[in-house]
Image (cartoon, rainbow, N blue to C red):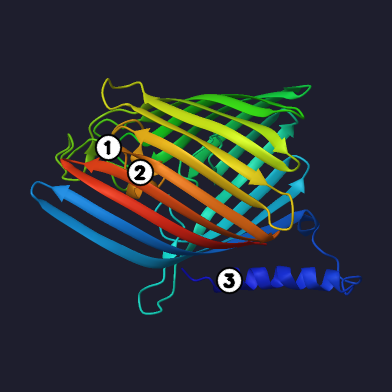
């Protein structure tokens, strides 16, 4: 991808901002849209260690992998009117829907920089909005059990919101395209979710229920990789590409409750569950955990733990958490995390994942340790 036009674009915007800050823009008439535009970004440097053990029959295969990775994201949100917002984000990575990482490899080769988000947000009323394009997943979730945090959906979302005192309710509905075919029915997703939340001095909580209906999943081509989902090697049209054997009609539940335990220290309990109602076996997944977050003192921190157990066809594995169990379903295990923020815009974190999964007839142990340095701007 040629990023020179993108660099020039951000250089012009930076110049406007610099002139404004230095008081040099008195004689420069800035475009109206620029006055209602916000820019943001983040950079992450990661060291990752993976311990992999495969037990297959009487033989054992094991290795340890070390790699360094980086992630860069640059975004803009602009509101040309009271009722419209346009947003876009560029990110490092590849075409993989659930990763914006680039490995430090390839003999100092240049890295990919791609369109991560591009959307229009229409909000004609305070209680109503429509989102068109490629945007963040609109469904509330408390974990990455069903959706990896890097996934951005593509399609149309509508939202209705209502508040009464300290209680808020919302309804999210959408239709999304996964794969468009010239001479066959498209693969897609229809989703609906209801949410209710409340906030007071003593407790904050949110509860959600959603139904996600994947269209033309049965005997449809897998999305990138089956990643543990049951598949067949040949479709009805005779091609040799891997196809899903089952349909995926997902019923999901999630909830989180947060309570203050001391001055500027909060404790949260959360859970998420999914059931594939289209099949009778290997259809359930569950995750539960807690977080402790402190903003007290000169070194804010957060720590957490979670456990999950995901059966093979509980959800579309190609869209779930890519770090846990190497991104595979038919998995279970633990995740422990800790992060500290010596500066408002700077944080250091460590995450340990201890997991195991089953792929075909093989049992595999997969442990991952990640150390991150993150700057937001």
Whether residue 328 is visible: yes
As drawn, the label of residue 5 is 3
As drawn, the label of residue 229 is 1
**Crowdedness near tag 2: few (<14), some (14–19) or many (≥20) residues, C-alpha within 10 Å:** many
Mark 3 element type: helix
Q: Position of residue 168 (x, y in %)?
A: 70, 24
**Crowdedness near tag 1: few (<14), some (14–19) or many (≥20) residues, C-alpha within 10 Å:** many
Q: Is residue 199 above or below residue 228?
A: above
Counting residues from the start of the chain, the first of labels 1 and 3 encountered is 3
Asked whether, in this view, residue 266 is left or right of residue 49, the answer is right
Q: Is residue 320 above or below residue 159?
A: below
Asked whether, in this view, residue 119 is left or right of residue 53, the answer is right
Q: Residue extending furthest bottom?
A: 107
As drawn, the label of residue 285 is none
Asked whether, in this view, residue 179 is left or right of residue 246, the answer is right
Q: Which residue is label 2 attached to?
A: 318
Whether residue 233 is visible: no
What's the CA distance linking mark 1 and mark 3?
Answer: 41 Å
Instruction: Tell me how many marks there are.
Output: 3
**Rendered image quadrant of residue 103:** bottom left
Residue sitting nearer the eye, 21 or 281: 281
Q: Residue at x 29, y 42 (%)?
A: 222
Q: Position of residue 228 (x, y in %)?
A: 27, 41
Mark 1 element type: loop
Q: Is residue 31 above or below residue 259?
A: below
Q: Residue extending furthest front?
A: 262
């Amino acid at each position: 991808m040629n990023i020179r036009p993108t660099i020039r674009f951000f250089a012009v915007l930076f110049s406007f901002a610099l002139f404004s800050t230095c008081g040099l823009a008195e004689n420069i008439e800035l475009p109206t849209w620029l006055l209602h535009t916000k820019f943001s970004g983040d950079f992450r440097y990661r060291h990752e260690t993976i311990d992999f053990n495969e037990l297959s029959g009487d033989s054992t295969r094991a290795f340890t992998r070390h790699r360094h990775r980086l992630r860069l994201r640059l975004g803009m949100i602009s509101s040309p009117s009271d009722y419209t917002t346009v947003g876009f984000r560029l990110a490092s990575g590849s075409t993989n829907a659930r990763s914006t990482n680039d490995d430090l490899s390839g003999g100092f080769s240049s890295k990919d920089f791609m369109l991560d988000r591009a959307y229009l947000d229409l909000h004609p009323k305070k209680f109503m909005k429509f989102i068109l394009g490629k945007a963040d997943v609109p469904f509330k979730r408390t974990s990455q059990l069903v959706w990896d945090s890097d996934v951005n959906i593509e399609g149309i979302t509508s939202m209705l919101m209502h508040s009464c005192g300290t209680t808020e309710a919302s309804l999210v509905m959408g239709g999304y395209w996964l794969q468009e075919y010239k001479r066959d029915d498209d693969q897609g997703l229809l989703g609906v979710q209801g949410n209710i939340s409340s906030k007071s001095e003593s407790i904050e909580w949110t509860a959600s229920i959603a139904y996600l209906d994947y269209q033309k999943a049965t005997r449809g081509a897998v999305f990138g990789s089956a990643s543990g989902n049951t598949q067949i090697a040949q479709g009805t049209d005779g091609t040799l590409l891997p196809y899903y054997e089952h349909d995926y009609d997902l019923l999901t539940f999630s909830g989180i409750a947060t309570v203050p335990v001391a001055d500027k220290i909060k404790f949260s309990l959360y859970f998420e569950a999914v059931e594939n109602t289209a099949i009778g076996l290997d259809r359930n997944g569950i995750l539960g955990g807690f977080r402790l977050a402190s903003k007290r003192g000169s070194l804010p921190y957060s720590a957490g733990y979670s456990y999950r157990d995901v059966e093979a066809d509980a959800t579309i594995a190609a869209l779930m958490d890519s770090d846990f169990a190497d991104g595979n379903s038919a998995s279970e295990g633990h995740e422990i995390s800790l992060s500290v923020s010596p500066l408002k815009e700077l944080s250091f974190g460590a995450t340990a994942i201890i997991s195991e999964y089953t792929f075909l007839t093989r049992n595999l142990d997969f442990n991952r340790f990640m150390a991150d340095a993150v700057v937001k701007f």
